[in-house]
Amino acid sequence: MKIKSYIIVMLFVSGLISSCKYDTTIANPDDYVKIYMSQAAESPANRTFIMADTLNTIIFGASYGGPATNEQDIQVSFDASPELVADYNQTNETDYDVLPAGSYEFENKSGVIRKGQYSTDPLKIKIKTKGALQQFKQYLLPVSIVQVSGNKPVNEALKTTYFRVEAQREGMSFKVLSFGKAGGTIDMNAVANIVNAQGADIVLVREMDIKTTRSGGVDQAEVLSGLLGMPNYVFAESIASYQGGKYGATVFTKYPIVKQETFILPTGNTSAEKGPLAVLELQINENQRITFAGTHLNASAAVRDVQLAELIRITEDYKDKPMILAGNFNDRPVGGPIYTAMAIKGWEYPCTTCPPNSPVVNPLNYSDFIMYRTSQDFKVLSYTVGTTSTSTHLPVIAQFTLYK
Protein backbone atom coordinates (compact mmCIF):
# COMPACT_ATOMS: atom_id res chain seq x y z
CA MET A 1 0.00 0.00 0.00
CA LYS A 2 2.89 2.38 0.71
CA ILE A 3 4.29 1.77 -2.77
CA LYS A 4 0.98 2.50 -4.46
CA SER A 5 0.46 5.61 -2.31
CA TYR A 6 3.87 6.92 -3.30
CA ILE A 7 3.11 6.47 -7.00
CA ILE A 8 -0.24 8.23 -6.63
CA VAL A 9 1.47 11.15 -4.89
CA MET A 10 4.09 11.33 -7.63
CA LEU A 11 1.44 11.34 -10.36
CA PHE A 12 -0.46 14.05 -8.50
CA VAL A 13 2.68 16.13 -8.16
CA SER A 14 3.46 15.66 -11.83
CA GLY A 15 0.05 17.11 -12.66
CA LEU A 16 0.72 20.12 -10.48
CA ILE A 17 4.05 20.94 -12.04
CA SER A 18 2.45 21.31 -15.45
CA SER A 19 1.08 24.65 -14.18
CA CYS A 20 3.92 25.73 -11.87
CA LYS A 21 7.60 25.00 -11.41
CA TYR A 22 7.15 23.67 -7.88
CA ASP A 23 5.39 24.43 -4.63
CA THR A 24 7.46 27.29 -3.21
CA THR A 25 6.17 26.54 0.28
CA ILE A 26 8.32 23.38 0.30
CA ALA A 27 11.82 24.13 1.52
CA ASN A 28 14.64 22.44 -0.41
CA PRO A 29 12.39 20.60 -2.91
CA ASP A 30 15.38 18.74 -4.36
CA ASP A 31 15.56 16.81 -1.08
CA TYR A 32 12.36 15.01 -2.12
CA VAL A 33 13.52 13.90 -5.55
CA LYS A 34 13.64 10.13 -6.09
CA ILE A 35 14.40 7.96 -9.13
CA TYR A 36 12.31 4.80 -9.41
CA MET A 37 10.95 2.05 -11.70
CA SER A 38 7.19 2.36 -12.07
CA GLN A 39 6.85 -1.34 -13.04
CA ALA A 40 8.27 -2.29 -9.65
CA ALA A 41 4.89 -1.56 -8.08
CA GLU A 42 3.38 -4.64 -9.83
CA SER A 43 5.48 -7.11 -7.81
CA PRO A 44 5.71 -9.30 -9.80
CA ALA A 45 5.17 -7.73 -13.21
CA ASN A 46 3.58 -10.55 -15.21
CA ARG A 47 4.67 -11.07 -18.80
CA THR A 48 3.25 -14.01 -20.76
CA PHE A 49 4.51 -14.86 -24.25
CA ILE A 50 3.60 -17.31 -26.98
CA MET A 51 6.29 -19.86 -27.82
CA ALA A 52 7.77 -18.75 -31.15
CA ASP A 53 10.98 -18.45 -33.11
CA THR A 54 10.70 -14.66 -33.01
CA LEU A 55 11.95 -12.73 -29.98
CA ASN A 56 9.55 -11.15 -27.50
CA THR A 57 10.04 -7.83 -25.73
CA ILE A 58 9.89 -6.58 -22.17
CA ILE A 59 9.70 -2.80 -21.81
CA PHE A 60 11.21 -1.10 -18.76
CA GLY A 61 12.60 2.25 -17.69
CA ALA A 62 13.02 4.76 -14.88
CA SER A 63 11.00 7.75 -13.74
CA TYR A 64 11.65 10.98 -11.88
CA GLY A 65 9.52 11.86 -8.88
CA GLY A 66 9.54 14.98 -6.76
CA PRO A 67 7.87 18.38 -6.23
CA ALA A 68 10.37 20.25 -8.44
CA THR A 69 10.79 20.23 -12.19
CA ASN A 70 13.66 18.09 -13.46
CA GLU A 71 16.33 20.68 -14.26
CA GLN A 72 19.02 18.44 -15.76
CA ASP A 73 19.62 15.26 -17.77
CA ILE A 74 19.75 12.23 -15.47
CA GLN A 75 21.37 9.04 -16.71
CA VAL A 76 20.07 5.82 -15.16
CA SER A 77 21.81 2.45 -15.52
CA PHE A 78 20.18 -0.95 -15.04
CA ASP A 79 21.17 -4.60 -14.84
CA ALA A 80 19.66 -8.00 -14.13
CA SER A 81 19.79 -9.13 -10.50
CA PRO A 82 19.27 -12.90 -10.58
CA GLU A 83 20.78 -13.22 -7.13
CA LEU A 84 17.59 -11.65 -5.70
CA VAL A 85 15.32 -14.50 -6.79
CA ALA A 86 16.06 -16.74 -3.81
CA ASP A 87 15.23 -13.98 -1.32
CA TYR A 88 12.07 -13.07 -3.25
CA ASN A 89 10.88 -16.69 -3.15
CA GLN A 90 11.57 -16.97 0.55
CA THR A 91 9.84 -13.69 1.38
CA ASN A 92 6.79 -14.33 -0.79
CA GLU A 93 6.57 -18.13 -0.38
CA THR A 94 6.95 -18.70 -4.12
CA ASP A 95 9.16 -21.06 -6.10
CA TYR A 96 10.01 -19.21 -9.31
CA ASP A 97 13.06 -20.31 -11.28
CA VAL A 98 15.65 -17.78 -12.36
CA LEU A 99 15.12 -16.81 -16.00
CA PRO A 100 17.96 -18.63 -17.84
CA ALA A 101 20.84 -16.32 -18.77
CA GLY A 102 20.75 -17.31 -22.44
CA SER A 103 17.05 -16.50 -22.81
CA TYR A 104 17.25 -12.71 -22.49
CA GLU A 105 19.38 -9.82 -23.70
CA PHE A 106 19.29 -6.10 -22.92
CA GLU A 107 19.19 -3.86 -25.98
CA ASN A 108 20.48 -1.08 -23.77
CA LYS A 109 21.22 -1.04 -20.06
CA SER A 110 20.96 2.71 -19.60
CA GLY A 111 18.56 5.52 -20.39
CA VAL A 112 18.31 9.26 -19.86
CA ILE A 113 15.59 11.26 -18.15
CA ARG A 114 15.91 14.42 -20.18
CA LYS A 115 15.76 17.90 -18.66
CA GLY A 116 12.12 18.82 -18.20
CA GLN A 117 11.00 15.19 -18.67
CA TYR A 118 9.92 12.64 -16.10
CA SER A 119 10.92 9.26 -17.54
CA THR A 120 13.43 7.59 -19.80
CA ASP A 121 12.52 6.52 -23.28
CA PRO A 122 11.29 2.89 -23.22
CA LEU A 123 14.14 0.42 -22.86
CA LYS A 124 13.89 -3.14 -24.13
CA ILE A 125 14.86 -6.64 -23.05
CA LYS A 126 14.59 -9.26 -25.80
CA ILE A 127 13.22 -12.61 -24.59
CA LYS A 128 13.85 -15.90 -26.37
CA THR A 129 11.13 -18.49 -25.70
CA LYS A 130 11.35 -21.39 -28.14
CA GLY A 131 14.24 -23.68 -27.22
CA ALA A 132 15.07 -21.60 -24.14
CA LEU A 133 12.05 -21.80 -21.82
CA GLN A 134 9.72 -24.57 -20.71
CA GLN A 135 6.06 -23.93 -21.42
CA PHE A 136 3.90 -23.02 -18.42
CA LYS A 137 6.96 -22.72 -16.20
CA GLN A 138 7.16 -19.41 -14.37
CA TYR A 139 10.51 -17.67 -14.25
CA LEU A 140 11.63 -14.53 -12.47
CA LEU A 141 13.88 -11.83 -13.91
CA PRO A 142 14.73 -9.03 -11.43
CA VAL A 143 15.89 -5.83 -13.14
CA SER A 144 17.39 -3.16 -10.88
CA ILE A 145 18.57 0.42 -11.03
CA VAL A 146 22.30 0.18 -10.38
CA GLN A 147 23.52 3.74 -10.93
CA VAL A 148 22.09 7.26 -11.27
CA SER A 149 24.05 10.34 -12.38
CA GLY A 150 24.15 13.56 -10.37
CA ASN A 151 23.91 11.76 -7.06
CA LYS A 152 20.14 11.63 -7.36
CA PRO A 153 18.70 9.28 -4.72
CA VAL A 154 16.83 6.10 -5.64
CA ASN A 155 13.55 5.01 -4.09
CA GLU A 156 14.69 1.71 -2.58
CA ALA A 157 11.14 0.32 -2.49
CA LEU A 158 10.86 0.79 -6.27
CA LYS A 159 14.44 0.10 -7.24
CA THR A 160 13.87 -3.40 -8.64
CA THR A 161 11.20 -4.74 -10.94
CA TYR A 162 10.55 -8.48 -10.67
CA PHE A 163 9.38 -9.61 -14.11
CA ARG A 164 7.56 -12.94 -13.98
CA VAL A 165 7.96 -14.59 -17.38
CA GLU A 166 5.87 -17.49 -18.67
CA ALA A 167 5.88 -19.01 -22.16
CA GLN A 168 2.86 -20.74 -23.66
CA ARG A 169 2.05 -22.27 -26.99
CA GLU A 170 -0.68 -20.65 -29.01
CA GLY A 171 -3.98 -22.29 -28.21
CA MET A 172 -7.76 -22.21 -28.24
CA SER A 173 -10.21 -22.67 -25.39
CA PHE A 174 -13.32 -24.84 -25.12
CA LYS A 175 -15.61 -26.33 -22.47
CA VAL A 176 -16.47 -29.94 -21.72
CA LEU A 177 -19.52 -31.00 -19.70
CA SER A 178 -20.41 -34.42 -18.25
CA PHE A 179 -23.86 -35.09 -16.82
CA GLY A 180 -26.10 -37.97 -15.73
CA LYS A 181 -29.67 -36.83 -16.39
CA ALA A 182 -31.30 -39.86 -14.63
CA GLY A 183 -32.77 -42.73 -16.62
CA GLY A 184 -36.37 -41.83 -15.89
CA THR A 185 -36.05 -38.22 -17.02
CA ILE A 186 -38.00 -37.65 -20.20
CA ASP A 187 -38.14 -33.83 -20.23
CA MET A 188 -35.40 -32.99 -22.72
CA ASN A 189 -36.14 -29.28 -22.44
CA ALA A 190 -35.14 -29.40 -18.77
CA VAL A 191 -31.94 -31.27 -19.64
CA ALA A 192 -31.14 -28.82 -22.43
CA ASN A 193 -31.63 -25.83 -20.11
CA ILE A 194 -29.08 -27.24 -17.67
CA VAL A 195 -26.53 -27.96 -20.39
CA ASN A 196 -27.02 -24.73 -22.36
CA ALA A 197 -26.55 -22.64 -19.22
CA GLN A 198 -22.92 -23.78 -19.11
CA GLY A 199 -22.00 -22.91 -22.71
CA ALA A 200 -20.18 -26.19 -23.28
CA ASP A 201 -18.70 -27.19 -26.64
CA ILE A 202 -18.50 -30.95 -26.00
CA VAL A 203 -21.17 -32.64 -23.88
CA LEU A 204 -21.58 -36.15 -22.50
CA VAL A 205 -25.11 -36.94 -21.32
CA ARG A 206 -25.53 -40.32 -19.66
CA GLU A 207 -28.64 -42.43 -19.05
CA MET A 208 -30.20 -41.72 -22.44
CA ASP A 209 -33.17 -43.59 -23.91
CA ILE A 210 -33.54 -44.29 -27.61
CA LYS A 211 -37.20 -45.05 -28.47
CA THR A 212 -38.00 -46.85 -25.22
CA THR A 213 -41.50 -47.33 -23.87
CA ARG A 214 -40.93 -45.11 -20.85
CA SER A 215 -39.72 -42.26 -23.08
CA GLY A 216 -42.80 -42.57 -25.29
CA GLY A 217 -40.80 -43.95 -28.18
CA VAL A 218 -38.78 -40.73 -28.41
CA ASP A 219 -35.19 -40.73 -29.62
CA GLN A 220 -33.83 -38.61 -26.80
CA ALA A 221 -30.45 -38.14 -28.45
CA GLU A 222 -32.04 -36.72 -31.60
CA VAL A 223 -34.32 -34.39 -29.67
CA LEU A 224 -31.59 -33.16 -27.35
CA SER A 225 -29.26 -32.58 -30.29
CA GLY A 226 -31.73 -30.05 -31.69
CA LEU A 227 -32.28 -28.37 -28.33
CA LEU A 228 -28.53 -28.01 -27.77
CA GLY A 229 -27.84 -26.79 -31.28
CA MET A 230 -25.29 -29.58 -31.66
CA PRO A 231 -26.09 -31.59 -34.79
CA ASN A 232 -23.02 -33.80 -34.34
CA TYR A 233 -23.56 -36.61 -31.85
CA VAL A 234 -22.79 -40.27 -31.20
CA PHE A 235 -24.86 -42.66 -29.08
CA ALA A 236 -23.09 -45.54 -27.30
CA GLU A 237 -25.34 -48.24 -25.93
CA SER A 238 -24.96 -50.07 -22.65
CA ILE A 239 -28.20 -52.04 -23.05
CA ALA A 240 -28.93 -53.01 -26.65
CA SER A 241 -32.51 -54.09 -25.98
CA TYR A 242 -34.40 -52.14 -23.32
CA GLN A 243 -38.16 -51.44 -23.23
CA GLY A 244 -38.40 -51.80 -26.98
CA GLY A 245 -35.44 -49.52 -27.56
CA LYS A 246 -31.89 -48.87 -26.36
CA TYR A 247 -30.21 -47.30 -23.34
CA GLY A 248 -26.76 -45.73 -22.99
CA ALA A 249 -24.86 -42.44 -23.26
CA THR A 250 -24.51 -39.77 -25.93
CA VAL A 251 -21.71 -37.37 -26.82
CA PHE A 252 -22.84 -34.11 -28.41
CA THR A 253 -20.42 -31.61 -29.96
CA LYS A 254 -20.42 -28.46 -32.02
CA TYR A 255 -17.24 -29.67 -33.73
CA PRO A 256 -17.18 -31.89 -36.82
CA ILE A 257 -16.72 -35.60 -36.06
CA VAL A 258 -13.89 -36.97 -38.17
CA LYS A 259 -14.02 -40.50 -36.81
CA GLN A 260 -16.16 -42.36 -34.30
CA GLU A 261 -16.17 -45.72 -32.54
CA THR A 262 -18.43 -47.17 -29.88
CA PHE A 263 -17.68 -49.98 -27.47
CA ILE A 264 -19.50 -51.90 -24.73
CA LEU A 265 -17.39 -52.37 -21.62
CA PRO A 266 -17.77 -55.92 -20.22
CA THR A 267 -18.98 -56.95 -16.78
CA GLY A 268 -17.24 -60.30 -16.41
CA ASN A 269 -19.39 -63.26 -15.40
CA THR A 270 -22.25 -61.12 -14.12
CA SER A 271 -25.53 -59.86 -15.49
CA ALA A 272 -24.72 -56.29 -14.44
CA GLU A 273 -25.33 -53.42 -16.82
CA LYS A 274 -22.47 -53.04 -19.25
CA GLY A 275 -20.62 -49.80 -19.79
CA PRO A 276 -21.04 -47.55 -22.84
CA LEU A 277 -17.94 -46.03 -24.40
CA ALA A 278 -17.92 -43.57 -27.30
CA VAL A 279 -14.62 -42.45 -28.79
CA LEU A 280 -14.69 -39.52 -31.23
CA GLU A 281 -12.00 -37.73 -33.18
CA LEU A 282 -13.04 -34.07 -33.41
CA GLN A 283 -11.82 -31.31 -35.73
CA ILE A 284 -11.42 -28.48 -33.23
CA ASN A 285 -10.21 -25.98 -35.81
CA GLU A 286 -8.64 -25.97 -39.23
CA ASN A 287 -5.36 -27.44 -38.00
CA GLN A 288 -6.12 -29.24 -34.74
CA ARG A 289 -7.91 -32.42 -33.71
CA ILE A 290 -8.54 -34.00 -30.36
CA THR A 291 -9.92 -37.38 -29.27
CA PHE A 292 -12.84 -37.29 -26.87
CA ALA A 293 -14.26 -40.29 -25.04
CA GLY A 294 -17.33 -40.62 -22.85
CA THR A 295 -18.21 -43.55 -20.61
CA HIS A 296 -20.11 -44.82 -17.56
CA LEU A 297 -18.55 -47.42 -15.26
CA ASN A 298 -20.54 -49.73 -13.01
CA ALA A 299 -21.28 -48.98 -9.36
CA SER A 300 -19.91 -52.39 -8.31
CA ALA A 301 -16.16 -52.32 -7.62
CA ALA A 302 -15.72 -55.88 -8.91
CA VAL A 303 -17.48 -55.04 -12.18
CA ARG A 304 -15.61 -51.74 -12.47
CA ASP A 305 -12.28 -53.56 -12.31
CA VAL A 306 -13.24 -55.63 -15.37
CA GLN A 307 -14.45 -52.53 -17.22
CA LEU A 308 -11.35 -50.56 -16.25
CA ALA A 309 -9.03 -53.09 -17.85
CA GLU A 310 -10.93 -52.81 -21.13
CA LEU A 311 -11.15 -49.01 -20.89
CA ILE A 312 -7.39 -48.80 -20.49
CA ARG A 313 -6.80 -51.20 -23.36
CA ILE A 314 -8.97 -49.19 -25.73
CA THR A 315 -7.70 -45.75 -24.76
CA GLU A 316 -4.07 -46.86 -25.04
CA ASP A 317 -4.63 -46.95 -28.81
CA TYR A 318 -4.95 -43.16 -28.62
CA LYS A 319 -2.12 -42.39 -26.21
CA ASP A 320 -0.12 -40.41 -28.76
CA LYS A 321 -3.00 -37.99 -29.39
CA PRO A 322 -4.45 -35.16 -27.28
CA MET A 323 -7.36 -36.85 -25.51
CA ILE A 324 -10.11 -36.02 -23.00
CA LEU A 325 -12.10 -38.67 -21.14
CA ALA A 326 -15.33 -37.86 -19.30
CA GLY A 327 -17.97 -39.89 -17.55
CA ASN A 328 -19.21 -41.49 -14.36
CA PHE A 329 -16.32 -43.48 -12.88
CA ASN A 330 -18.10 -44.24 -9.59
CA ASP A 331 -14.93 -43.51 -7.64
CA ARG A 332 -13.46 -40.70 -5.58
CA PRO A 333 -10.97 -38.50 -7.44
CA VAL A 334 -8.08 -38.38 -7.49
CA GLY A 335 -6.95 -41.01 -4.99
CA GLY A 336 -9.47 -43.75 -5.74
CA PRO A 337 -8.28 -46.98 -7.39
CA ILE A 338 -9.77 -46.06 -10.79
CA TYR A 339 -7.91 -42.77 -10.89
CA THR A 340 -4.71 -44.24 -9.53
CA ALA A 341 -4.72 -46.85 -12.31
CA MET A 342 -5.47 -44.24 -14.98
CA ALA A 343 -2.71 -41.96 -13.72
CA ILE A 344 -0.19 -44.76 -14.26
CA LYS A 345 -1.23 -44.66 -17.92
CA GLY A 346 -0.51 -40.96 -18.18
CA TRP A 347 -3.94 -39.53 -17.46
CA GLU A 348 -3.94 -36.21 -15.64
CA TYR A 349 -6.60 -34.51 -13.54
CA PRO A 350 -7.90 -30.93 -13.51
CA CYS A 351 -7.76 -30.67 -9.73
CA THR A 352 -6.39 -32.48 -6.71
CA THR A 353 -9.11 -31.43 -4.26
CA CYS A 354 -12.05 -31.66 -6.62
CA PRO A 355 -15.57 -30.43 -5.80
CA PRO A 356 -18.14 -33.21 -5.27
CA ASN A 357 -21.27 -33.33 -7.43
CA SER A 358 -23.76 -35.52 -5.53
CA PRO A 359 -26.33 -35.12 -4.03
CA VAL A 360 -27.64 -31.90 -5.53
CA VAL A 361 -28.06 -30.25 -2.12
CA ASN A 362 -24.81 -30.09 -0.12
CA PRO A 363 -22.81 -32.43 -2.39
CA LEU A 364 -20.47 -34.85 -0.65
CA ASN A 365 -19.95 -37.64 -3.20
CA TYR A 366 -18.63 -38.05 -6.73
CA SER A 367 -19.90 -39.51 -9.96
CA ASP A 368 -18.95 -37.63 -13.11
CA PHE A 369 -15.39 -36.51 -13.67
CA ILE A 370 -13.23 -35.24 -16.54
CA MET A 371 -9.60 -36.18 -17.18
CA TYR A 372 -7.11 -35.53 -19.97
CA ARG A 373 -3.83 -36.61 -21.51
CA THR A 374 -1.41 -34.74 -21.44
CA SER A 375 -0.36 -31.39 -19.96
CA GLN A 376 1.82 -30.88 -23.02
CA ASP A 377 -1.42 -30.60 -25.01
CA PHE A 378 -3.85 -29.01 -22.59
CA LYS A 379 -4.02 -26.46 -19.86
CA VAL A 380 -6.98 -26.57 -17.46
CA LEU A 381 -8.52 -23.13 -17.05
CA SER A 382 -11.28 -24.16 -14.65
CA TYR A 383 -13.12 -27.14 -13.18
CA THR A 384 -16.55 -26.46 -11.71
CA VAL A 385 -19.79 -28.16 -10.71
CA GLY A 386 -23.22 -26.94 -11.85
CA THR A 387 -25.99 -25.86 -9.50
CA THR A 388 -29.11 -27.52 -10.97
CA SER A 389 -29.92 -31.01 -12.17
CA THR A 390 -32.65 -33.38 -13.34
CA SER A 391 -31.04 -36.15 -11.26
CA THR A 392 -29.22 -36.62 -7.97
CA HIS A 393 -25.96 -35.69 -9.71
CA LEU A 394 -24.86 -32.20 -10.72
CA PRO A 395 -23.05 -31.70 -14.03
CA VAL A 396 -19.29 -31.16 -13.99
CA ILE A 397 -17.64 -28.68 -16.34
CA ALA A 398 -14.00 -28.28 -17.32
CA GLN A 399 -12.60 -25.52 -19.50
CA PHE A 400 -9.42 -26.30 -21.41
CA THR A 401 -6.97 -24.58 -23.66
CA LEU A 402 -5.64 -26.81 -26.40
CA TYR A 403 -2.14 -25.91 -27.56
CA LYS A 404 -0.67 -26.34 -30.99
Image: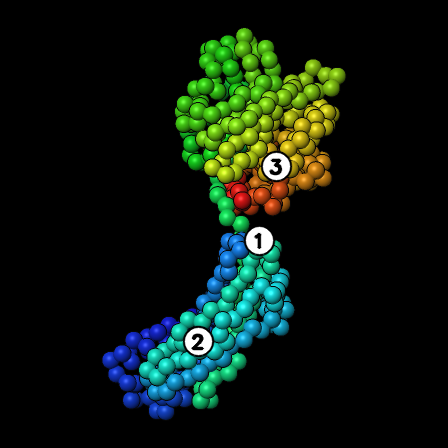
- Residue at the spot 72% in from the left edge and 39% down from the top edge: 344
Q: Quadrant of residue 28?
A: bottom left
Q: Earlier in the sequence, mark 1 or mark 2?
A: 2
- What secondary structure is marked by label 2? loop
Mark 1–mark 2 contact, CB under 8 Å? no
- Residue at the spot 47% in from the left edge and 15% down from the top edge: 219
Decide: is 305 above or below 77.
above
Q: How many marks?
A: 3
Decide: is 46 above or below 298.
below
Q: Which residue is mark 2?
A: 62
The residues bearing labels 2 and 3 have C-alpha atoms spaced at a distance of 48 Å
- What secondary structure is marked by label 1? loop
Q: Earlier in the sequence, mark 2 or mark 3?
A: 2
The residues bearing labels 3 and 1 have C-alpha atoms spaced at a distance of 20 Å
| Residue type indicated by callout 2 | Ala
Q: Which residue is mark 3?
A: 321
Instruction: Point out residue 353 in the picture as x, y percentages from the top left corner.
Output: 61, 45
| Residue type indicated by callout 3 | Lys
- Residue at the spot 56% in from the left edge and 16% down from the top edge: 247
Residue lying at the far top in this picture: please name it.
Answer: 244
Instruction: Point out residue 343 in the picture as x, y percentages from the top left corner.
Output: 69, 40
